[in-house]
Amino acid sequence: MNMKKKALAVFGIAAASALVLSGCSASDGGSDSAATGEPIVIAAVYDGNFFPEAPPAAQAVFDEYNAAGGFNGRPIQLDTYDEKTDPATSATATKDALDSGAIAFVGSSSLMNCAVNNQTWSDNNIVSIQGTGVDPFCFSTPNVAAANTGPFYDTTASLYNGSEVLGYKAICGLFVPDDAVGKAAYEQAVANWSEATGEKLALADYSLTRGMTSYAANVAALKSANCDAVFINEVGAADAAILAEMTNQGIVLPALLLTSAYSDQFAQSVNYGAQITLPAEFAPYTDAKDENCVEWRALMEANGIAATSFAQGGYLAAQYFIAILETIEGDVTRDAFTEAAKAYTTPYAGTGAGMAGSPWTFGPEDSHQPNAASWMMHIEPNTQAWVSDGPWLLGSDMGWKNTTIAG
């Protein structure tokens, strides 16, 4: 790797001996000795401002795999690029990764990665297994299949749980649309919920933006809408700020959030006077009784990676990549991997499969929503710990229709 790539690669390959000492079992790389052959280069473009855990979680999986022999003696080299919430930087990082010979993108996590680069992926016949897909193009274009459910599925699930399970009948919504395409996708998600339940939002405020310094006016508008719950589609820290502003204005309503708030850090940052509920995109790692996350948690702890849903997505994206890689016979090239991904229609059943509530595949379709299952979690009023609810809420339970791109 040249110096430019070294500067962009944030997470290097850790020493194999440290991984052996950690006691974590490696994926079957077909050898008892570390891989020393020509590296198989892949890349992750991530947003360090919002989703820092996904690429190192993927790297931890590859470290184990490489320590166990890699793919026919070849190690997987994950080059990571921080796009810094900037479209131009995201596009440049993608070009740099392509120029470096990457055969796939694995574990990318970003607010805009798919929107900026999906056409570039198609033009270069390369696929992306997103760790955290956020924008609509992550779920509606042919060369990307995300490990996570995404905010649009989560929106339908959160609202459905709110009205059909918790019984809220006047839900108000505070939305960051990001752009016109994002707004349309959120409107589709709300429409999915309305069609399934017959309910409509009592208020739909799409005027919020990322990084707002004050939510006072948005919160004040809730007072006249007679809400009995509020849905918020923001990311964890901003969710906490909105809830704090609601408390300041004496509006203590049950809150329906997205998976981005599912973390120990978020729970410990709030002490809210009403119940907080959200859909986890994967098995509930905060539940000590859930056995599906045991291997994942051990690997995260061994590598000092924070336990978050984003880390779950990065971990699974890496596992899915390895499963597809191991179907390739002959030369491992970009074209060969893309062909293998689009032929990968058998549900993944390897390490970590139980962390997702629906079977993951890639396949040849023009769009992909392989993860269509949520596990509900909540925080009791005036507490700071997650409670696991379950069971899995499936897309088929609520008439889910996949995201499309408006216009």
Image (cartoon, helix red, strand yellow):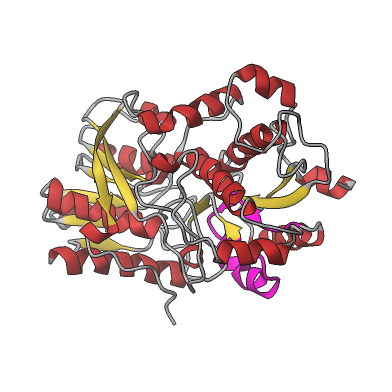
Q: Residue at x 31, y 40 (%)?
A: 243
Where residue 394 sits, quadrant-wise, is: bottom left
Farthest top residue? 21
Is residue 91 at all visible to an observer of this figure?
A: no
280 displayed left or right of 226: right
Query: From what the image shows, is residue 314 above or below residue 331?
Result: above
At which x and y percent is residue 211? 49, 50
Indicate yes or no whether the magenta region holds residue 269: no
Is residue 373 at all visible to an observer of this figure?
A: yes
At which x and y percent is residue 1? 86, 46
367 displayed left or right of 4: left
Indicate yes or no whether the magenta region holds residue 112: yes
Q: Residue at x 39, y 52 (%)?
A: 359
| Of 33 and 151, the residue lying toward us | 33
Q: Residue at x 75, y 41 (%)?
A: 75
> Which segment did they paint magenta?
102-127
Q: Residue at x 38, y 71 (%)?
A: 184
| Of 214 and 2, the residue lying toward us | 2
